[in-house]
Image (cartoon, rainbow, N blue to C red):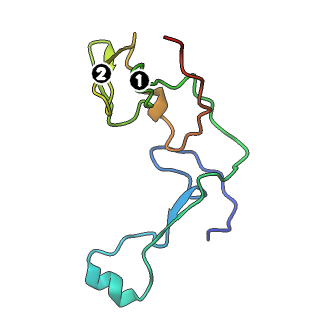
Amino acid sequence: LSTTESLVTECGNTDPYFLRSTFYVLPHSEYTLESTGLPLALVASPLADRGSYTEVPGLDRCAHCRTYFCSLTRCADGAYFCHICDKKNEAPICHQNNLRCATMEALAQSQPKT
């Protein structure tokens, strides 16, 4: 139930407290969905407070457009390429600390002075 208290360890999927579907399993076809008579929807609570968080040391951001590192970011030769502006960003190790958790809250830092 959506009201059940739970402790979730994220391993690629977000905590259902933040985002959940009206179905646990998606219908195979539109006909199957229509035959249920139930709506297919997502319930999103992006500002929900769960009380406990996993600390991640720093979030990588593009030095050019300030976009955050994500699963679409390409890594190559000690650098990564922004998925928005395609600019090269130097990184000693192209680690994916930012992708370890499915749900993340980041306090935006002020832009560096150039």
Position in image of residue 43 (x %, y %):
54, 66
Q: Does residue 22 sit above or below 15 in this rendering?
A: below
Query: Which comes before the other along the chain, label 1 or label 2?
Result: 1
Residue at the spot 28% in from the left edge and 74% down from the top edge: 28
Question: Which residue in the rendered view is the most extreme toward the front?
Answer: 114
Q: Does residue 105 sit above or below 40 in this rendering?
A: above
Question: Which residue in the rendered view is the most extreme toward the right?
Answer: 51
The residue nearer to you, when weighing 74 against 95, is: 74
Residue at the spot 43% in from the left edge and 31% down from the top edge: 67
Q: Does residue 8 sit above or below 95 in this rendering?
A: below
- The number of callouts visible is 2
Left or right of 95 in this view: 15: right
Residue 1 is tagged as none
Quarter-wise, where is residue 91 in the image? top left
Question: Mark 2: which secondary structure?
Answer: loop
Question: Mark 1: which secondary structure?
Answer: loop
The residue nearer to you, when weighing 13 against 103, is: 103
Q: CA distance from mark 1 to mark 2?
A: 8 Å
Give the amino acid at mark 2: Lys
The residue to which callout 1 is attached is: 62
Position in image of residue 66 (x %, y %):
45, 27
Q: Dot 2: few (<14), some (14–19), or many (≥20) neighbours within 10 Å?
A: some
Q: Looking at the image, do the residues carrying marks 1 and 2 touch, with CB atoms under 8 Å apart?
A: yes
Position in image of residue 37 (x %, y %):
41, 89
The residue to which callout 2 is attached is: 87
Left or right of 68 in this view: 51: right
Q: Does residue 16 sit above or below 96 in this rendering?
A: below
Give the amino acid at mark 1: Cys
For the N terminus, which image quadrant?
Answer: bottom right
Q: Dot 1: few (<14), some (14–19), or many (≥20) neighbours within 10 Å?
A: many
Residue at the spot 26% in from the left edge and 13% down from the top edge: 77
